[in-house]
Amino acid sequence: MSFEAEGLAPRDVADALAEAKARKVAGSHPDAVVIGCDQVLDFRGRVWGKPESSDAARAQLTTLCGQRHALHSAVVLYHNAEPVWRHAAEVRLTMRAFSEAYLDDYLTRNWPGVQDSVGGYKIEGEGLRLFSAIEGDHFAALGVPLLPLLSYLSDRGFIAS
């Protein structure tokens, strides 16, 4: 199934991926509280996946250099094998201009560690140096809109508050 072919907006793609993860686990553990999360990179309305090679990461980072993009992070909670809550957050990031030499060194130091991150960077590590501005929830930028999730779990008695 291609979400792009279906015309889903990037935020909806993140939500659908998060729900698919939660639904899969909830099917095997129907009495459990299951949390599914996912994140997509949105550059000019197109969803980008994780780079499959350092060359793909180089291409992504070169395109993003000096540009603004968004990360959409979604979380879906299943309880008793049914979706009961969902939340999506958008974080806007502006990548600074950097030299090709810096990019070469960055990928040498950080590949394959950034292979599992959309865009080829992790802001919780050296990838933060690639940015001049980040607007939005820090935890959503890391991949999980954690504060809304914790509030929901606390308000519903799933965790102590």
Image (cartoon, rainbow, N blue to C red):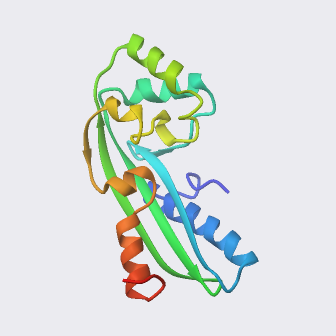
Q: Is residue 96 above or below residue 2?
A: above
Q: Quadrant of residue 30?
A: bottom right
Q: In which quadrant will I find the N terminus? A: bottom right
Residue farthest along the front direction in this orientation: 160
- For the point 65% across and 73% down, the residue is 23
Q: In which quadrant will I find the C terminus? A: bottom left
Q: Is residue 64 above or below residue 34?
A: above
Q: Position of residue 21 (x, y in %)?
A: 63, 65
Q: Position of residue 9 (x, y in %)?
A: 45, 57
Q: Is residue 71 left or right of residue 117?
A: left
Q: Is residue 107 left or right of residue 93?
A: right
Q: Quadrant of residue 95?
A: top left
Of residues 86 and 158, which is closer to you in this image?
158
Q: Is residue 68 above or below residue 47?
A: above
- For the point 46% across and 82% down, the residue is 159
Q: Position of residue 68 (x, y in %)?
A: 30, 38
- For the point 34% across and 30% down, the residue is 130
Q: Position of residue 111 (x, y in %)?
A: 56, 27
Of residues 105 and 27, which is closer to you in this image?
105
- For the point 44% across and 60% down, the residue is 144
Q: Quadrant of residue 33?
A: bottom right
Residue farthest along the right direction in this orientation: 28
Total numbered labels? 0
